[in-house]
Amino acid sequence: MNRSGGGVARPSRVWWFVGAGFIATAVLAAVMVAAPVASLVVVVLFWASIAVGMVVRLVKARPGSRIRSAFGPVMSAAEEYQRLYTTQPGLGISIDYAIREQQENSAETPGGQDR
């Protein structure tokens, strides 16, 4: 749902990046088979589009959160890659687990206070 309370919800911007990634992967696979030199061009264009997107996010972000806004999607992708590669929980899951564990421990202590 949009902010006005009605209408159709717009897809998250993350899904646009995911879709672009799938399309780029399919194009890259097709081009690598056809012409190896052209595949390098596709790779360079892909990374250039990511760089342009980061610059746009950097310019549009509020002062004080520009770097976080610009590098946020790249860091999220890196964290997800690391989570899948190492088969260990990512930062967000680890933080949720730590908060849940802390709440359970504080509920078990008499009076609900930490020592």
Image (cartoon, rainbow, N blue to C red):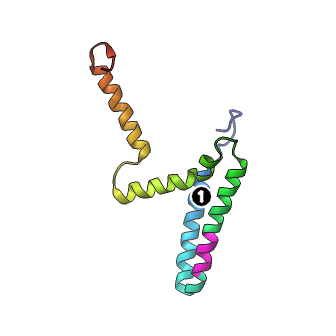
Q: Quadrant of the C terminus?
A: top left
Task: Say few, some or many: other residues with alpha carbon within 10 Å of mark 1 (under 14 / 14 to 19 / 20 or more).
Answer: some
Nearest the eye: 21 or 79: 79
Q: Tell me which residue sits at (32%, 31%) in the image.
A: 101
Residue 45 in the image: x percent, y percent? 64, 72
Residue 95: which quarter of the image? top left
Amino acid type for the residue under numbered disc 1 = Phe
In front of the other: 24 or 9: 24
Q: Which residue is mark 1?
A: 17
Nearer to the camera, 96 or 63 = 63
Relative to 32, is 7 above or below? above
Q: Where residue 102 sits in the image (x, y, percent)?
A: 34, 29
**Residue 76 position within the rendered picture, expressed as x and y whole percent measured from the top left:** 51, 52
Quadrant location, the N terminus: top right
Vertical relation: 31 (above or below) 66: below
Q: Label 1's element?
A: helix
Q: Does the segment drawn in magenta span residue 44?
A: yes
Q: State the residue at coordinates (37%, 60%).
A: 85
Q: Which segment did they paint magenta?
A: 39-46
Question: Is 94 part of what is drawn in magenta?
Answer: no
Q: Is residue 83 left or right of residue 20?
A: left
Q: Is residue 21 above or below residue 79?
A: below
